[in-house]
Structures are given as structure tokens and as C-alpha cells.
Amino acid sequence: MAGKVVLLDFWPSLFGMRVRIALAEKGIKYEYKEEDLSNKSPLLLEMNPVIKQIPVLIHNGKPVCESLIIVQYIDEVWNDKCPLLPSDPYQRAQARFWADFVDKKVYVASRKIWRPKKEEQEAGKKEFLETLKTMEGELGGKPYFGGETFGGGVPQDYRVG
């Protein structure tokens, strides 16, 4: 599905990065608009009036908010291109589990590293490293959580288009 695609984002955002990866994997061209989170743009406030946060994907003038919801939207709208999630329901559930793990564990632990108190930073570093070790253990040497290919689809070398 063609149309104008705009991403409201802030470059270091883990959640925005998730959306940028999905857009890149699908080969979707989009306009990137950097947001100043201390001075939110009128466009961001208009497109996400409830939560007022990035990322926001605007497709043909309609906003989609929250990174996991945006990724699912991208996968459904541009379904003629490589899938972002495995076709197997169990593997899809596992992929969603690890996305949730990143939201609840990796992100939370990484935020603690930037705390002003040294002891909070040290605790945050330890927690962050433990979550990364957990993820590394799950990968077990595979390049992706789903196995050898992104989204459990056809390996990139064999994709058409």
C-alpha cells in the first residue's frame, strides 16, 4: 500500500529504533521528522494527543502510536513484503514475548544507568548486563530470536524485489 509515510521520532529512542528497523526491513520509504522532546511539536501533539510521545507513524495523514502497534501495522499494511513476525503462532508469541521483555527489562534497566546517583547507576549497569545476558542465552548463537532469518521468513539473499 503506497501513500505518504512520516515518522515522528527521536534518534536515540529504542522504541523509535524498533519502528525504523521494521520500515527498513520492509523497504518502506518515509519522511523522518526529529522531535525535540522538551519542546514537542504541534504535529506530535496533534497526532498523539493522548500520550504525547514518540514514535508516531503517520500514514496517509492517519496516526498510529506505540512502537509495537506500529510494527504490527507496518507488517499488516505492507504484507506483500517479507514478514516481520514468524507465521507459526508459537514462534510469533515468542517474538512478542521478547519484544515485551525489551520494553519491561532492557529499557527500564538502561534508564537507571542515567540516574544522577552513582549507586543507582551501578545497580542499573548490573541489571542491564543481566538482561543482555538473558537475551544472549536465548539467542544461543542464532542471528535472530526466530532462528536464522529475520521474522522467520525467507532469507534476505533470496527475496524478490
Image (tube, grey):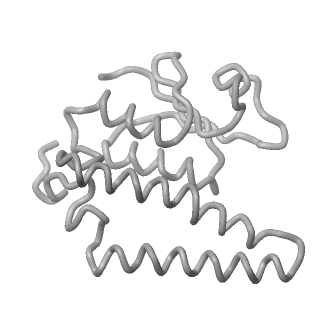
Is 99 left, or right, of 120 in this rendering?
left
Q: Determine whether 19 is above or below 30 in the image.
A: below
At 19% from the left and 33% from the top, the residue drawn is: 80
Residue 29 versus residue 108: which sits nearer the camera? 108
**Percent of width and height locating residue 124:** 71, 75
At 56% from the left and 31% from the top, the residue drawn is: 65
The outermost residue toward the right is 117
Q: Quadrant of the C terminus?
A: top left
Q: Determine whether 97 is above or below 144 in the image.
A: above
The outermost residue toward the top is 61
Q: Determine whether 114 is above or below 156 in the image.
A: below
Q: Quadrant of the N terminus?
A: top left
Count of numbered circles on the image: 0
**Percent of width and height locating residue 37:** 77, 43
At 71% from the left and 40% from the top, the residue drawn is: 35
**Percent of width and height locating residue 147:** 22, 66
Is 104 left, or right, of 25 in this rendering?
right
Residue 22 versus residue 90: which sits nearer the camera? 90
**Percent of width and height locating residue 42:** 76, 23
Image quadrant where residue 38 sits: top right
Residue 97 versus residue 24: which sits nearer the camera? 97
At 52% from the left and 31% from the top, the residue drawn is: 57
Is 6 left, or right, of 36 in this rendering?
left
Q: Determine whether 42 is above or below 104 in the image.
A: above
